[in-house]
Image (cartoon, helix red, strand yellow):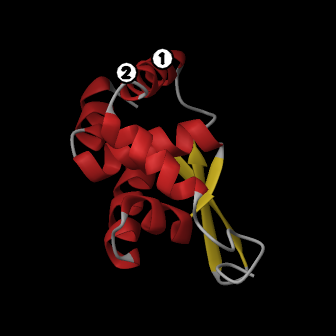
């Protein structure tokens, strides 16, 4: 991965918000991201596909559901950029709201949403 690829991937607000949530929560189902960001599943899937193509995230399938996480194979410098973005986002109302909405989600994965 080069810096242009990473910064292009993070330049979209939805993708950046998704990366911040993923970095703060280890792994999330598409339904959790859609709920937290208050967006439709196809839009979230589109953005996650772009992040996957750029190598920022990786996924795993569990039945019909797909779970995403930050790619553990990212270069150290790319991980540092994401960590800095998460740290900075932690002071922003929008990131705090995204996390609070996620935490308020009823029946998170393993229950009705993704069972």
Which residue corresponds to the image point at 48% horizontal and 61% vertical from the top-left? 33
The local secondary structure at tag 1 comes to: helix
- Residue tagged 1: 80
Closest to the observer: 16 or 60?
16
Task: Determine contact: label 2, label 1, CB under 8 Å.
Answer: no
The local secondary structure at tag 2 comes to: helix
Which residue corresponds to the image point at 40% horizontal and 31% vertical from the top-left? 1
Q: Position of residue 29 (x, y in %)?
A: 60, 64
Which residue corresponds to the image point at 36% horizontal and 66% vertical from the top-left? 38
Q: Position of residue 74 (x, y in %)?
A: 54, 30
Q: How many marks?
A: 2
Q: What is the quadrant of the C terminus in the image?
A: bottom right
Q: Which is more foreground, mark 2 or mark 1?
A: 2
Binning the other alpha carbons within 10 Å of mark 2 as few (below 14), some (14 to 19) or many (20 upward) gives few
Q: Position of residue 56 (x, y in %)?
A: 46, 41
- Residue tagged 2: 88
Answer yes or no: is residue 100 visible: yes
Q: CA distance from mark 2 to mark 1?
A: 12 Å
* Side of 59 where 5 appears, left or right: left
* Side of 99 where 68 appears, left or right: right
Can you say whether 28 is above or below 85 in the image?
below
* Side of 29 where 77 appears, left or right: left
Mark number for residue 2? none
Can you say whether 83 is above or below 45 in the image?
above
Can you say whether 57 is above or below 83 in the image?
below
Q: Position of residue 45 (x, y in %)?
A: 41, 69
> Where is residue 65, by image quadrant?
bottom right
């Amino acid at each position: 991965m080069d810096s242009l690829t990473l910064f292009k991937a993070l330049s979209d607000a939805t993708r950046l918000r998704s990366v911040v949530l993923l970095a703060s929560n280890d792994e999330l189902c598409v339904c959790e991201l859609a709920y937290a960001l208050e967006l439709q599943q196809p839009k979230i899937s589109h953005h996650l596909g772009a992040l996957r193509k750029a190598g920022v995230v990786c996924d795993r399938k569990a039945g019909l559901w797909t779970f995403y996480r930050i790619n553990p194979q990212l270069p150290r410098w790319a991980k540092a950029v994401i960590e800095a973005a998460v740290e900075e986002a932690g002071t922003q109302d929008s990131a705090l709201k995204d996390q609070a909405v996620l935490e308020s989600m009823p029946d998170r994965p393993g229950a009705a949403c993704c069972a």
